[in-house]
Every structure is written in structure tokens, then in C-alpha cells.
């Protein structure tokens, strides 16, 4: 067997291990199980075996594009109307969250071995999968970013139901039944491929930063808002495959030294993350006071991460899902679209 054959066999074995790990994580109820599965399998391959494994560039670009389409498809007219009714306080709270994230990143830089861009990206609240997918392209340490972003998501997923029930007196099982009228697999595949390819081509033509992710994200949002997509979404299997690819790409880049650096950063990072979660809850109280929504809705709308877990909790306890989704999606767009500008600003003084 030639070198090329061994490389393909090696990659196939890592992918198979990632799939098995993803299924296990899904059974445990972890958020983004495919990304975690890919990350774990890639890490084991990088640290446990000789030689270097790489994810083909085309596969990485396809993974970024699919994630971009999935995020862009969250935008719809109902979401925009919910934001429009209270646009000023929602915008101010979103900008406040970005400022808190940058402040948390500055504190994280106190840890040796963390660059300004890595610190900021590791603490950006919202759009964790998108931030991880674009981290390397924008000069951040994707390994550190991935670990700390999903440490925050895990903490939020664990704490949020407790805070909602104990702190706000929410009760489970208050959601109304929602009809499932999402178009099927063929329409979803066509929507995903069309937005991914079209967004990628246009994004590169206009020199959009991280065109593989942001181009498809904008394309999917436009298609959704114009009604051309007919409500189509990225099929679950395609989305999982994209997360798995991004997880693998980050995982195979781990080294023992990078793992030690992350380990040293964890105590400080955990304290910073908890402070960020508490400060975001304070912004939720401000949002509630200025818009008239309930304190619980304000808390859920400003929770810094775990979008799908937040929406599931909001639906289960009978919160205003449309308002929560609107604020969360607006923040996601602001964070992802501003990330290239933030990276350029933070790199400027260091590289100038």
C-alpha cells in the first residue's frame, strides 16, 4: 500500500472513531455531540499515534460553509419583527455582550501563552461553533478556542434549567404543540448546497473575511428572508457531518504542549466564564426592565451561548420563544460578522 493509501486509511479510521464518539455523546445529551466526537477522535489520533493526520482543505471548507448556512437559516421575518419592536435596548444589550466578551478575553490574556485574538475568541459569547470554525483562519489558537467555548456551553446547559426553575420559578411542560412543516431532505440538501456554493463564490469575489463561513451565512439569511428557501433547513445529517469535520480539524492539530497550555489556563478561564455568565444575566435584567418582557425571558435571551439548549428550555417552560430567538440570533450575527474586525484590531498593535 502506498503513502496515499495509508493516509486515506488513517483518515477513515479517525472518522469512524469520531462517528462512534459522536453517537455516544449524543446519547449522553451533550451539546454539539458531532463536534465533540470529532474533537476527541482527532485529539487521540494526534497524541496517541505517530505521524500527522490532516483534514483535506476541501472538506474543511465544506464544513465551514454548511455551518454558515445552518446559522444563516435561523433568520426569518418573525424574528426580525420581534427585534424591531424593541430594537434599541436589544441592540444595546447585544453590543454590551460583545464588550463583556472582549473584556473577558483581556482578562484571559493574563495567562501565559494566550494571544489577544485567542483570548477574545475563546470568550466571545454566542455562535460557538461558528467562532471555532473561523478561529484558525483569523489567527487564533483553534484548540484553546474550542475547549473554552464549549466549556462555557456545557456550564450554561447545566446551570440554565436550575436557574430558570429555582431563580425564576419556571415550570417544565408549559410549551404548546408546534406543527412540523419543515420541508424534507431533498429541499434541505438543495438549499444547503445552493447557499453554500453561491455564498462561497460571492464571498471570495468580494474578498469577504472567512468567506467559507460568512458567505454562506449571508446567502442563507437572504434566501430565508426573501422566502426563496420555502422554510428549508440544513438536514440534520449534513449538519452533524459539518460539525464532525470541524471538530476533527481542531483535534488533529493538538500537541502535548498545547494541551498543557490549555490545562494551565482552565482555572482562570472557569472563573472568567462564570463572571461572564453572571454579567450576562445582569444584561438580561436590563433588557427585561427596558422592554417589558418577563425577567425569565430577559435571562434566556441574554444567556451567553448554547442557542439550541436555550430554545429547548424556553419552549419547555412556556417562555416567549420568538423574542428569545430574536435576541440570540441578532447577537450570533453581530458576533460572527464582527469577528474578523475584532481579530484585525487585536492583531494590529502586536503585528504593527
Image (cartoon, helix red, strand yellow):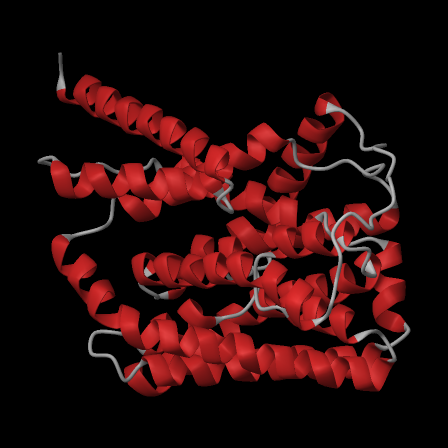
Q: How many marks?
A: 0
Q: Is residue 283 placed above or below 158 in the rendered structure?
A: below
Q: Residue furthest top?
A: 1
Instruction: Indicate the quadrant containing the N terminus: top left, top right, bottom left or bottom right.
Output: top left
Q: Is residue 352 visible?
A: no
Image quarter of residue 288: bottom right
Q: Is residue 309 left or right of residue 113?
A: right
Q: Picture coordinates of residue 224 (x, y %)?
A: 80, 47
Say which of 126 and 2 sits in front: 126
Q: Is residue 122 placed above or below 322 in the rendered structure?
A: below
Q: Which residue is drawn at 48% across and 33% down?
A: 27
Q: Is residue 52 placed above or below 148 in the rendered structure?
A: above
Q: Is residue 167 left or right of residue 147?
A: right
Q: Picture coordinates of residue 142 (x, y %)?
A: 34, 58
Q: Is residue 41 left or right of residue 146?
A: left
Q: Residue furthest left?
A: 50
Q: Is residue 283 placed above or below 233 in the rendered structure?
A: below
Q: Is residue 277 visible?
A: yes
Q: Picture coordinates of residue 135 (x, y %)?
A: 41, 60
Q: Residue at x 27, y 23 (%)?
A: 13
Q: In this view, does 127 lie to the left or right of 311?
A: left
Q: Which residue is drawn at 20% across and 36% down?
A: 45
Instruction: Indicate the quadrant containing the C terminus: top left, top right, bottom left or bottom right.
Output: bottom left
Q: Picture coordinates of residue 336 (x, y %)?
A: 57, 64
Image quarter of residue 20: top left
Amino acid at each position: 500500500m502506498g503513502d496515499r493509501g495509508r493516509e486515506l486509511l488513517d483518515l477513515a479510521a479517525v472518522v469512524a472513531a469520531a462517528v462512534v464518539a459522536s453517537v455516544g455523546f449524543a446519547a449522553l445529551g451533550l451539546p454539539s455531540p458531532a463536534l465533540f466526537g470529532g474533537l476527541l477522535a482527532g485529539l487521540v489520533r494526534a497524541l496517541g499515534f505517530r505521524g500527522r493526520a490532516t483534514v483535506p482543505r476541501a472538506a474543511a471548507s465544506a464544513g465551514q460553509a454548511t455551518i454558515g448556512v445552518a446559522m444563516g437559516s435561523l433568520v426569518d421575518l418573525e424574528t426580525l419583527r420581534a427585534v424591531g419592536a424593541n430594537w434599541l435596548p436589544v441592540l444595546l444589550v447585544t453590543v454590551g455582550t460583545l464588550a463583556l466578551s472582549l473584556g473577558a478575553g483581556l482578562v484571559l490574556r493574563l495567562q501565559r501563552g494566550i494571544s489577544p485574538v485567542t483570548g477574545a475568541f475563546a470568550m466571545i459569547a454566542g455562535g460557538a461553533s461558528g467562532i471555532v470554525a473561523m478561529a484558525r483562519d483569523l489567527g487564533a489558537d483553534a484548540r484553546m478556542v474550542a475547549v473554552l467555548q464549549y466549556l462555557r456551553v456545557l456550564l450554561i446547559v447545566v446551570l440554565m434549567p436550575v436557574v430558570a426553575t429555582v431563580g425564576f420559578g419556571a415550570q417544565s411542560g408549559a410549551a404548546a404543540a408546534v406543527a412540523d412543516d419543515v420541508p424534507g431532505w431533498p429541499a434541505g440538501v438543495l438549499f444547503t448546497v445552493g447557499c453554500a456554493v453561491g455564498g462561497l463564490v460571492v464571498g471570495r469575489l468580494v474578498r469577504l473575511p472567512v468567506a467559507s463561513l460568512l458567505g454562506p451565512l449571508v446567502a442563507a439569511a437572504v434566501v430565508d428572508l426573501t422566502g426563496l428557501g420555502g422554510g428549508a433547513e440544513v438536514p440534520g445529517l449534513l449538519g452533524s457531518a459539518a460539525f464532525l469535520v470541524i471538530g476533527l480539524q481542531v483535534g488533529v492539530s493538538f500537541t502535548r504542549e498545547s494541551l498543557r497550555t490549555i490545562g494551565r489556563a482552565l482555572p482562570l478561564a472557569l472563573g472568567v466564564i462564570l463572571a461572564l455568565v453572571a454579567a450576562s444575566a445582569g444584561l438580561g435584567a436590563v433588557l427585561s426592565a427596558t422592554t417589558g418582557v418577563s425577567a425569565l425571558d430577559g435571562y434566556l435571551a441574554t444567556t451567553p451561548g448554547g442557542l439550541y439548549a436555550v430554545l429547548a428550555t424556553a419552549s419547555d417552560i412556556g417562555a416567549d420563544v420568538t423574542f428569545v430567538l430574536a435576541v440570540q440570533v441578532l447577537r450570533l450575527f453581530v458576533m460572527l460578522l464582527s469577528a474578523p474586525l475584532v481579530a484585525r484590531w487585536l492583531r494590529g498593535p502586536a503585528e504593527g
